[in-house]
Image: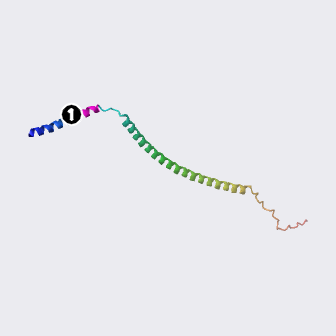
């Protein structure tokens, strides 16, 4: 009787093996490119690329902002120097264009001595 019980177990296991092999046969060979997976993988790669690109563009914008601020500061300094130079030129030209004072004719304090004729 023990053999009958073992036979049933083997029979059941054999049926399960056959069913698994049939299921496996139905799966057939794997398709080399599964369009859905390829598309999903491409979307994931594209998303990663866009994230990296967005990060670099954000960094670039921040750098451009700092660059722009530095240029504005430099330009402001140049304009201040330009205004200072204009003032210096005006001051110097006003000094040059003022008429020079000529020394007043000195009135001689020496007394003229009369010359006597002999």
Which residue of the protein is positioned furthest toward the right in this rendering?
A: 118
Looking at the rendered image, the quarter that the C terminus falls into is bottom right
Looking at the rendered image, the quarter that the N terminus falls into is top left
- Residue 4: in magenta span: no
Q: Quadrant of residue 109?
A: bottom right
Instruction: Name the residue at 60% across, 53% down.
Output: 76
Q: Main secondary structure of the magenta part?
A: helix
The residue tagged with tag 1: helix, strand or loop? helix
Q: Label 1 neighbourhood size at 10 Å, few (<14), some (14-19), many (20+)? A: few
Q: Quadrant of residue 104?
A: bottom right
Where residue 69 appears, as percent x and y from the top left, is: 55, 52
Which residue is tagged 1? 18
Q: Seen in the image, is 35 located left or right of residue 73?
A: left
Where residue 100 appears, as percent x and y from the top left, is: 76, 58
Q: Seen in the image, is 46 located left or right of residue 69?
A: left
Instruction: Name the residue at 42% across, 42% down.
Output: 47
Q: Quadrant of residue 6?
A: top left
User: Who is closer to the viewer here, 19 or 89?
Assistant: 19
In the picture shown, does residue 105 fall above or below 54? below
Instruction: Name the residue at 17% across, 37% down.
Output: 12
In the picture shown, does residue 84 fall above or below 51? below
Question: What residue span does the magenta drawing correspond to?
Answer: 21-28
Q: Seen in the image, is 88 located left or right of residue 1?
A: right
User: Who is closer to the viewer here, 113 or 97?
Assistant: 97
Instruction: Name the residue at 59% across, 51% down.
Output: 75
Where residue 22 appears, as percent x and y from the top left, is: 24, 32
User: Who is closer to the viewer here, 53 or 36?
Assistant: 36
């Amino acid at each position: 009787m023990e053999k009958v019980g073992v036979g049933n177990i083997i029979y059941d296991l054999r049926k399960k093996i056959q069913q698994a092999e049939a299921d496996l046969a139905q799966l057939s060979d794997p398709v080399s490119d599964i369009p859905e997976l390829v598309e999903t993988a491409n979307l994931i790669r594209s998303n990663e690329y866009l994230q990296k690109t967005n990060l670099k563009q954000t960094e670039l914008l921040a750098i451009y902002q700092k660059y722009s601020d530095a240029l504005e500061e430099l330009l402001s300094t140049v304009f201040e120097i330009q205004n200072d130079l204009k003032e210096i030129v005006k001051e110097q030209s006003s000094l040059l264009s003022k008429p020079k004072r000529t020394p007043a004719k000195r009135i001689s304090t020496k007394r003229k001595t009369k010359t006597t004729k002999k």
